[in-house]
């Protein structure tokens, strides 16, 4: 049995927490506001693919967490907050995290979370990861609605070449435990490549869906919008060179075909905009634009959509 800390029991974190609890693992959740109060009062309820998972679990805000627990009490700390919150999490929990040696797994959008965590707790404790083909949101306080295959990919970040990595044996244990809990999980020996492959899709559809109000299928099957999606993905391929990942046209076409084959999915950025929440724009489009600027290349599709979205509420 694992003892897990889920930092951010929202749509994604709440779903995975329920699967771990169902499998008999011990899970501590963090949340805030009405959602936290509901978790404490009535437990966690997750609706997924026709099933209802209901579990009681310890739930705290960050201040309660650091006063009641030591970070080394956990076998793994999983961060599933929006990437826009990573800086604040490092600020609020950084000192507490530094007091222990527990590994930290990021399951967030973008390619900038792992560097922030590595700076805070040390690269040897960071596990890179991504949640694939999952949609999830808080339907009402304490209640999560989730859909999709809900896969996880994880690996050492950064990859260490030429010597045995102390995280590798742990990763094998985690992959087996996650799969046993009903979470399809695989190990990657190049997690940065996987993170950039996901950013291909995220930059292709998330900002444009938030701008237009359209789901992924509407965008990828529209004669005009599909060209913009492909263009933003192509700019992401170019940006990857700044991180020495070097995606190619094969990655571009594979990811475009993949997102085009999805059912109609309302992206997380569109949901956030509809609910008046901060957008992960800087961690998705911004990550691409910063790297293109560093490389001295233009990214007109991403730049245009990013600018329009930033000023759409003016």
Image (cartoon, helix red, strand yellow):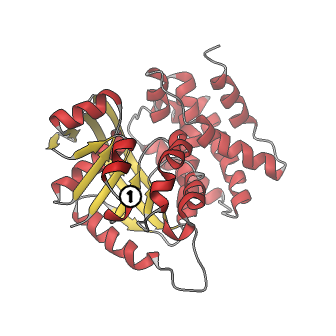
Q: Which residue is mark 1?
A: 77
In the picture, measured across the screen, residue 140 lies left or right of residue 7, that is: left
Quadrant of the rendered structure where residue 159 is? bottom right
Q: Residue at x 60, y 57 (%)?
A: 115
Residue placed farthest to the front in the image?
Answer: 67
Q: Residue at x 58, y 40 (%)?
A: 204
Residue placed farthest to the top in the image?
Answer: 314
Q: Residue at x 19, y 54 (%)?
A: 21
* Residue 223 appears in the rendering: no
SS category of the residue bearing label 1 = strand
Crowd around label 1: few <14 · some 14–19 · many ≥20 (10 Å): many
Q: Residue at x 30, y 31 (%)?
A: 35
Task: Indicate the position of residue 140 as horizontal and vertical percent values.
Answer: 27, 26
Quadrant of the rendered structure where residue 5 is? bottom left
Work out which quarter of the rendered image holds the C terminus and state it: top right
Residue placed farthest to the right in the image?
Answer: 296
Q: Is residue 134 above or below residue 102?
A: above
Task: Indicate the position of residue 170 as horizontal and vertical percent values.
Answer: 38, 74
Seen from the viewer's position, the closer of residues 247 and 3 is 3
Work out which quarter of the rendered image holds the N terminus and state it: bottom left
Task: Indicate the position of residue 8 as horizontal and vertical percent values.
Answer: 38, 43
Q: Is residue 41 above or below residue 132?
A: above
């Amino acid at each position: 049995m694992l003892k897990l800390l889920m930092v951010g029991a929202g749509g994604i974190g709440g779903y995975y927490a329920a699967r771990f609890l169902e499998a008999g693992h011990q899970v501590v959740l963090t949340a805030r506001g009405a959602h936290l109060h509901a978790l404490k009062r009535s437990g966690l309820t997750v609706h997924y693919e026709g099933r209802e998972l209901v579990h009681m679990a310890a739930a705290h805000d960050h201040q309660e967490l650091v006063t009641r627990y030591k970070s080394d009490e956990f076998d793994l700390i999983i961060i599933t907050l929006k990437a826009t919150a990573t800086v604040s999490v490092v600020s609020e929990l950084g000192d507490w995290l530094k007091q222990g040696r527990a590994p930290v797994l990021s399951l967030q959008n973008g390619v900038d979370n792992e560097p922030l965590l590595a700076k805070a707790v040390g690269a040897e404790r960071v596990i890179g990861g991504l949640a694939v083909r999952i949609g999830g949101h808080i339907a009402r306080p304490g209640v999560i609605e989730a859909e999709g295959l809900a896969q996880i990919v994880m690996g050492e970040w950064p990859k260490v070449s030429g010597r045995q990595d102390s995280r590798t044996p742990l990763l094998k244990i985690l992959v087996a435990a996650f799969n046993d809990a009903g979470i399809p999980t695989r190990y990657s020996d190049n997690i940065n490549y996987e993170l950039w492959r996901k950013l291909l899709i995220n930059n292709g559809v998330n900002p444009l869906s938030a701008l237009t109000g359209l789901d992924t299928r509407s965008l990828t099957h529209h004669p005009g919008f599909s060209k913009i999606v492909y263009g933003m993905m192509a700019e992401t391929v170019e940006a990857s060179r700044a991180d020495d990942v070097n995606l190619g046209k094969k990655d571009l076409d594979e990811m475009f075909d993949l997102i085009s084959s999805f059912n109609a999915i309302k992206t997380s950025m569109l949901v956030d905009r509809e609910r008046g929440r901060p957008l992960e724009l800087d961690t998705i489009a911004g990550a691409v634009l910063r790297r293109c600027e560093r490389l001295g290349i233009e990214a007109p599709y991403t730049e245009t959509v990013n600018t329009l979205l930033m000023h759409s509420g003016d």
